Image: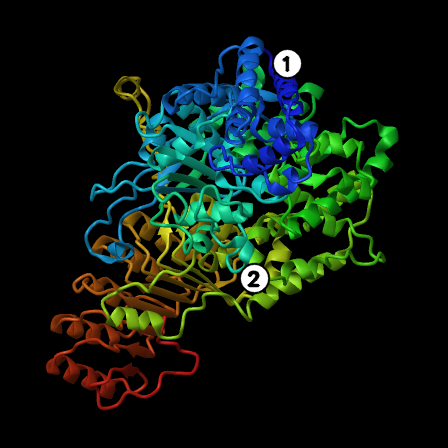
Amino acid sequence: MEPGAASGAARELLLAALEDLSQQQLKRFRHKLRDAPLDGRSIPWGRLENANAVDLAEELINFYGPEPALDVARKTLKRADVRDVAARLKEQRLQRLGPSSSALLSVSEYKKKYREHVLRQHAKVKERNARSVKITKRFTKLLIAPESAVPEHAAQEPAEEPERERARRSDTHTFNRLFRRDEEGQRPLTVVLQGPAGIGKTMAAKKILYDWAAGKLYHGQVDFAFFMPCRELLERPGTCSLADLILDQCPDRSAPVRQMLAQSERLLFILDGVDELPALGSAETAPCIDPFEVASAAGVLGGLLSKVLLPEARLLVTTRGAAPGKLQGRLCSPQCAEVRGFSDKDKKKYFYKFFQDEWRAERAYRFVKENETLFSLCFVPFVCWIVCTVLRQQLELGQDLSRTSKTTTSVYLLFISSVLRSAPAADGRRVQDELRKLSRLAREGVLRRRAQFSEKDLERLELRGSKVQTLFLSRKELPGVLETEVTYQFMDQSFQEFFAALSYLLEDEGAPRAPLGGVGALLRGDAELRCHLALTIRFLFGLLSAERMQDIECHFGCAVSERVKQDVLRWVQDQGQDCPRRVTEGTEKTQVLQGAEEPEEEEGEELNYPLELLYCLYETQEDAFVCQALRGLPELVLERVHLSRMDLAVLSYCIRCCPAGQALRLVSCRLAAAQEKKKKSLMKRLQGSLGGSSSQATIRKPLGSPLRPLCEAMMDQQCGLNSLTLSHCKLPDLVCRDLSEALREAPALTELGLVCNSLSEAGLRVLSEGLAWPQCRVQTLRVQQPGLQEALQYVVGVLQHSPALTTLDLSGCQLSGPMVTYLCAALQYPGCRLQTLSLTSVDLSEQSLQALRALGTAKPGLVITHPMLDSHPEPPKGFNSTL
């Protein structure tokens, strides 16, 4: 029987049974019904107290579903001592509906039914343009890298640093490994998938659910898996229990929820977007501890997250990259994995899946591959989708592909302008007005943490039925208490954030400020919202470039005020006065004295804040603006960042644009491995060697190190970088080679600090060659590297050749007697221009001290600092012996 027919038949049966009751029997039935829970759920007394027979029948059907409602009614009639009516209801039910199908299913039988339901529900996913595609056809594997188990200070040992576990492509094997046992045999119950917006976390989570239902994942370990979209649930009106949320995902209301929850160790909850959860502190966010307890959605999700609710259940949570630091206090022993997006190989696969037409796919892919910056941006699946969508339209219209831009902001803007071209030219003015209102709606939602909007919200801004509604908003129907509730949301969360940023530039110069405040309120708001607003702020920066502002004027028909740009510039410059995570003066020297231990790690969002600011500046792609902004940040400090290739590209761009006097410190940073070229097959190599090709053709330029983009930026004649400090960073020989090349040509670099970077003897020798180069401008050199006694001869040798070096700090190094003798000889070399030598905390023999005293007498202009020397005057003003 069809669901609609079954519902009607059940309603008729219930009404017939209840109308047979006297008023006294009906009253007793209502009281017994209040205490007759199914799977821990019963109809609230407020709905039952004054209900007549018709009302009761409706309440039973709506609350429990057709067949379970008949079961509940029959049992309640028996408890109300109206057994004849109960027996008649049972008999009539068998005649009309036959034996109950789902109500009699056991947990093991329901498992199969639920898996089939999940496969049907999630077989297709909606793309941002509302087109449905099969998940198996569109899903392209992502790179997922487990969190490294190597201690941070391992990089400081002389031995080779153990490699981080390599990123794996997100196939079934990788998904299964997420919950694998650790070295001690413990299986994690919480796995965190983290990554930036649009990187594919939600799609990966849905694919995990689909693969589980298909029997490919967690076989024999997970009986039921549930997908919980946090943002949608947080905006759900009213209260609910975990049992309610589970039933919402089941094919009917007769699921054996109590029995399912009794084996919580065999349940998997996928919480998508946990960074949306509000901070703890209010009664509304208090974690729920009972799966049948009615509470706010934040309380239920918070209970699962903190493991006070179903502590044995498995959790897979997704969050944006900046959020784990904020969540640490709520998670219980999480295993983290980073979603890194598409590999180069998978980008190509995605293009071919998207276009399907091989000729167009090849042409589009070849164009993007040749645009290095755009190709690197395509590691983010959503950006890749936008790029493909724009290129498909350009190919269909025969347009020039070179119009496609190279920053995330410009790609989004180009996508929006391409979508707007579908509107008739006559409607241009009206659509521009609608876009302003849509941007305002997005801004209200972002600042108030809302992703879903009601029809009243759209009516208030005159957007209901508008062109932009159909283009950029998706419609969703949610079951309400009395009637279906219609909500709207942007095609993707990142689009809402883009339009929110756009709203600040679409404000008229003389118009009154919006109720939520201008750009100053956005930038200087509550620090706790910084994570939530990070992408909006990044888009705002991207829209401020002269080129983007011209695009806005062209596409949206309004002049953009320069006031916004000046407000943003002042805000960046203010950051230099109160920049998070400043290293306390003397901290690094103390670390050297204590054996190169690293400080305790602090919350991720604070540590990464300077890098996020650099990403914002990168989005502008306006050299003059970046230079002016960095004048307020004379010292850039990045700590404990695992710098990806994109991070290094962003940092390099900002350093290339930086003003004179800029300082950069990288402290305890890890560098992404340089991209390796695939080895040719044996046959191809043999063909190359036997094919008569010249030896010149076989010579290849060696691969650059991960730090090469930064080194190239330092060599740019516009670069004003004055000071570079690398502290507790693993510097392999390849990095030393590129850094040595930069030292020869950097136009402004006068200070270099190398502190506990696990340098090899060969690496220090290569660096010394760069320092001794005639054009090298380094005047102050600090080397604090315990364990490399003999290799220091290369640094000392620089003194004889460097035309610029005036200050040398070897604090924390180990100097043998012969090395001190060599040092004294080098300092007396006619070409040596050194004025200050710092040997603080260096253990020296009495013979070495005597040699240094004699040197001081012979060269009275040389300042030597050491606690055991008779005279160690204060170093010259401006010299900072701490790093």
Residue 7 seen by the camera? yes
Can residue 677 be seen by looking at this rendering? Answer: no
The mark lying in front, picked from 1 and 2, is: 1
Which image quarter holds the C terminus?
bottom left
Image: 199 above or below 65: below
Mark 1 or mark 2: whose residue is earlier in sequence: 1
Label 1 secondary element: helix
Is 297 placed left or right of 450 in the picture? left
Q: Going 22% across and 69% down the picture, which residue do you hit? A: 813
**How many residues crowd mark 1 within 10 Å: few (<14), some (14–19), many (20+)?**
few
Depth check, front residue: 877 or 307 = 307
Disc number for residue 5: 1
Residue 803 position, x and y percent, is 37, 68
**Which amino acid, mark 2?**
Ala
Which residue is painted at 76% across and 29% down in the image? 421
- Image side of residue 327 versus residue 332, left or right: right
Secondary structure, mark 2, is helix
Q: Distance between the residues labelled 1 and 2?
A: 55 Å
Q: Which amino acid does label 1 sit on?
A: Ala
What colouring method underlies this structural image?
rainbow
Q: What's the residue at 53%, 16% (across, down)?
A: 90
Residue 30 picture location, percent across and down: 60, 35
Up the image or down, 46 lies above or below 74; here it is: below
Is 521 positioned to the left or the right of 164 in the image?
right
| Quarter of the rendering containing residue 846 | bottom left
Residue 527, disc: 2
